Amino acid sequence: MGVKSKAAAAILVLLLFLGSLWLQGGLDYHWDSCLKSYNQVNQPNHLSNSSGAEGALGSLGSPGSPGSLGVDQCPGQTFQVALLHAHLLAAQEHAADVLLQPYLSSWDDLVQFMEALGPMVGLISKEIETKTSIIRQLALMAEEGPEAELHPDSNPVESATTEVGDANEVEAFHHSSAYYSVRSMIRTELAQGLVDFEQQTDSGCRTLLRLHRALLWLKLFLEKLADMAGTGRLRSPSELCREAYQSTLAHHHTWFVRRAAELAFIAMPERGFFYRLVCVQNQEEFSALLSIVVRDLQEVYSRTQGALEEHGMLDLP
């Protein structure tokens, strides 16, 4: 095997290892979409109608209205920023709380966003889907009763693509008070003794904390991308993503994981790709659009942060 082939193989092994660790408390986060080519094909989100997103989407096509993105659908893209915006708004329908079903739907959108960025940045998307699947299945278990079991190998995200599975998932979130919102989930799991403050478990609260940390990283990254301060050179997405990581997720990762993450940032696409991804023409339009999304992410993050902090859950193992 030649030197180049050996180097390529070594990088691939490193990235696969990175993906396996990211959300397990060591790499808790976002690098699965990066070793997959992104297929720019429209795929309707199977949870949008149930989360209130359909109504929110109807108001997005009026540029200038409060909170409007000024766009509806971006033709030819799997990731739709308007749908992400709608899911984030739906998650905020109850004051001081976060509705779990649209919150998880917004993660579906963010996974598509990460996968759009290429193999390096998307290496962890499957781990994020695993985390959202855990909470979704816990909601189904709560709806079905105590005889239901959590099967780690099952994937509710995939099963929900069928009409029946989709309906069951929606019913679980709409009618199960246990997993209707972040606060209801916390109250339920504490009452049932499901949250362990000493060792790792698959509780919904611990799983939510991992997603919560990841959300801060993405929020900060998008915030930096939207920043137009100064008139000099706009810094590269790779540089901004690295900064966002160092101030957020890096604090929860081992030395090896941090070094591996640094390698992954190198393949981040340039700004022009991000413009095309959300159907804008320049940085000014891009910044205006992202500022709305960042505001939504901040609100969801702040509410979740408050709920976890109140119950001493910001450091669950």
Image (cartoon, rainbow, N blue to C red):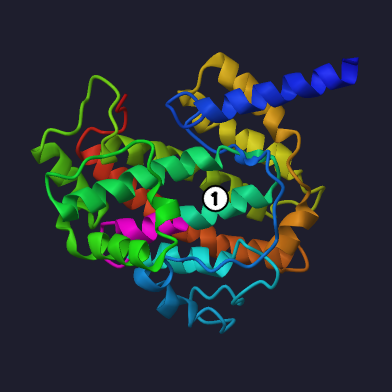
Q: Is residue 95 in view?
A: no
Compared across the picture, whether 145 is left or right of 278 comes to left
Q: Choose between 202 and 297: the one closer to the eye.
A: 202
Give the residue displayed 76% in from the left and 46% down from the top: 269
Which segment did they paint magenta?
93-106
Q: Amino acid at mark 1?
A: Val
Q: Is residue 220 in view?
A: yes
As drawn, 307 above or below 177: above
Compared across the picture, whether 69 is left or right of 302 comes to right
Quadrant, the C terminus: top left
Quadrant, the N terminus: top right
Q: Report the number of numbered marks.
A: 1
Q: Is residue 86 magenta?
A: no
Question: Residue 242: x and y, percent?
Answer: 65, 34
Q: Residues within 10 Å of mark 1 (few under 14, many from 20)?
A: many
Q: Secondary structure at mark 1?
A: helix
Give the residue displayed 62% in from the left and 27% down from the top: 16
Question: Residue 8: x and y, percent?
Answer: 80, 24
Give the residue displayed 49% in from the left and 66% down from the top: 45
Q: Is residue 102 magenta?
A: yes
Question: Residue 25: x and y, percent?
Answer: 42, 26
Identify the residue at the far left of this view: 191
Question: Residue 123: x and y, percent?
Answer: 61, 37
As drawn, 173 above or below 241: below
Task: Name the residue that disc number 1 marks.
Answer: 111
